[in-house]
Image (cartoon, grey):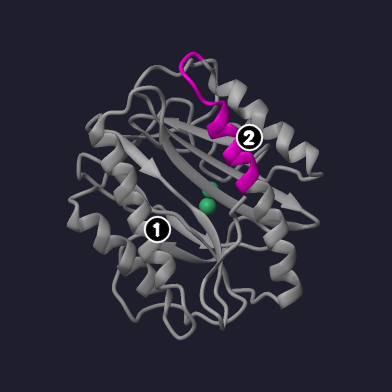
Amino acid sequence: MVEIKTDEALAAMREAGRVVGRALAAVQEAAAVGVTLQELDGVARDVLAGAGATSPFLGYRPSFAPIPFPAVICASVNDAVVHGIPDGYRLRDGDLVSIDCGAVLDGWAGDAAISFTVGTPDPADLALIETTRQALDAGIAAAVVGNRVGDISHAIGGVARAARRGLPADLGGHGIGRRMHEEPHVANTGRPRRGFRLQHGLVLAIEPMLMAGGRDDYRVDPDGWTLRTTDGSRAAHIEHTVAITEDGPRILTLP
Ligand code: MG
Ligand code: MG
């Protein structure tokens, strides 16, 4: 079932989203050559705790997962696409890092992700990140009253395919509210004018994840969580929680 939020709920979700945006900004600020992924997780934990928010990631255990997720961020480096577990890995010069973070505040969830480079960037990585950002922007621009979920999927996929990037076949965005993952699923590629009709009060996490090599398949690490490209190419992932409103799409996860 798709839950439509009241304006009061949208305001509360903006506050939850703001915590996510602040946590991501703090993590990017702290990320540097030599810093460990666990240290970045600690930065996000401090922001959440300071805001009185909890993490919907910590302890999360969907059916596919062998262990509950042990952190408040996903940290996916280079060929890792999404769901990387923050560990003792020390960031190296030129790494491409994707950080996904969620927060629950006053019972409402926010979910967002950023991708950035550490140290001296490879221009190819900057181009991949830029295309991913354009795909997200196109998806958000399509998140208007009267469109359908398929219009968002089509917009994202169009940008990715024009740049010959891969899209993990079955992964995408989702409705969000009191729970981090709600209906509807928001595929990152698809046909326009299909799916749930967008209306004021629908809130979606829109999250293109692009793989540089152009393949759509991926593999799962032995940890059961981390998804990686099969060709070793790098991936980027950018996400916002977005409310569909009569006044246009409202991004809830800006700092
Ligand atoms: Mg996320
Ligand atoms: Mg999400």
Q: Is 24 within the magenta?
A: yes
Type of residue at label 1?
Answer: Leu
Q: Quadrant of the N terminus?
A: bottom right
- Identify the mark at residue 136; answer none if there is no mark: 1
Main secondary structure along the magenta-highlighted residues: helix
**Relative to 166, is 196 above or below?**
below
SS label for mark 2 = loop
SS label for mark 1 = helix
Asked whether mark 1 lies closer than 8 Å to ligand 2, one says no
Q: Closer to the camera: disc 1 or disc 2? A: 1
**Relative to 157, is 115 above or below?**
above
Q: Which region shows up in magenta?
A: 21-34
Q: Nearer the viewer, residue 47 or 82?
A: 47
Q: Of label 1 and label 2, which has the lower sequence position?
A: 2
Residue behind mark 2: 68
Residue 73 coordinates in the image, percent (x, y):
59, 36
Q: Is residue 125 left or right of residue 82?
A: left
Distance from disc 1 to disc 2, alpha carbons, whole Å, reads 29 Å
Q: Is 71 within the magenta?
A: no
Q: Nearer the viewer, residue 56 or 251?
A: 251
